[in-house]
Amino acid sequence: MKLLIQELKERVPLRTVFAHYGHTDLPERNGKHFPCPFPENHARGDQRPSCNFDTGKDGFPRYHCFSCGERGDQFDFVERREGVDTAEATKIVAGIGGIIEGGTFTAPRKARPPVKTIPVHEKPEPIVFPEDLRVGTEAELKQLAELRRLDVHAVYLAACCGILRFGTHRGFPCWIVMDESRIVAEARRMDGKPFPHSGKKPNTLKNGKKSWPVGIKIRHSRPELFRKIVVVEGSADLIAAYHFNYTTGKMDSLPVAMLGKECREIHPEALKLFRGRDVRITPDADADGGGMEAARRWAKQIEEAGALSVTAFDFSGLTRIDGMPVKDLNDCTVIHPDDEHKLEGILA
Ligand SMILES: [Zn+2]
């Protein structure tokens, strides 16, 4: 006799499978959060429990971790936990329930203790934010819109999403890009000038990790609604991407920025957030081709992480209204009218 999947689900509930793997302290009702059963996905542990149960289309419970994106039923869980295919996972689930299949008894596997949370990195030092970090006054938001030639509503939108803040950094009034992860933050001066200590315009806040694509964890109750991710380079282009999203009305695309093409490996926690999404990379059209090379590297990692599709948009050949070549997304706010239609491809 071959058991139907549905029957198997009924006889070996998801909670039984979880308990078999040592996850016993589970909430009674659906919707209540508990620590993710894949602690290895959480570099610093799942400190604020991110997983919960809900009911699938077939009426049986499923698990879903909002932080690392793992989701599924008992078979998905065993597949992931044991690294086996669906057929093997089905046998293991049956085994856990002590079910006789095809006349042979599949012995329940010995429960193995859950994988301990092994910090991948030493617990990182928190970012040193300005003491006067703030959402920004109306005047500040307007000033930034003017400085970067952006629609002021788009700047408001970025502030609402938690990716734009203001504050004093190294003695200068600055605008700061960051996100809910608080893993990286970058400041630029409100007057658009470089910082004297480095001679550079952007300055990463102390302890920030540039491997984190800033903007990928926004303040939003349902981040999964963003089916597309646009990857830009640098904090200025991040705000510019909000500008184009706003002016073109494309509200299903989430802008994120890599802060510098030197980043070789995208942060593993961030890579998981690309899963199941369409990703467009818009590398800087710099003379040495370093932007394209970095984009290829990132595209490979994002693809391997399980993105639905990864495409690139190339700025080369586009011209600004003043005749200069377009180097990045921010330049596109002053694009020559003849090239405007090509722009639509960026956020398509
Ligand atoms: Zn998780």
Image: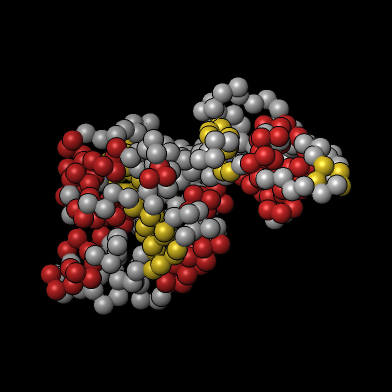
Left or right: residue 139 compared with residue 26: left
**Nearer to me, 43 or 110:** 110
Q: Residue at left 24%, top 55%?
A: 244
Q: How is the image coloured?
A: secondary structure
Left or right: residue 139 compared with residue 1: left
Q: Is residue 116 visible?
A: no
Q: How many marks?
A: 0
Q: Residue at left 33%, top 72%?
A: 314
Where on the picture, by quarter, is residue 223? top left
User: In the displayed structure, would residue 150 be above or below residue 323?
Assistant: above
Q: Residue at left 57%, top 52%?
A: 268
Q: Position of residue 12 (x, y in %)?
A: 71, 35
Left or right: residue 119 compared with residue 221: right
Q: Residue at left 44%, top 64%?
A: 310
Q: Is residue 87 visible?
A: yes
Judged from this view, the residue extending furthest toward the front is 1
Left or right: residue 150 compared with residue 73: left
Q: Position of residue 119 (x, y in %)?
A: 66, 41
User: In the displayed structure, would residue 71 be above or below residue 256?
Assistant: above
Judged from this view, the residue extending furthest toward the top is 28
Q: Report the quarter where the C terminus lies.
A: bottom left
**Nearer to me, 261 or 62:** 62
Q: Position of residue 257 (x, y in %)?
A: 39, 54
**Nearer to me, 50 or 192:** 50
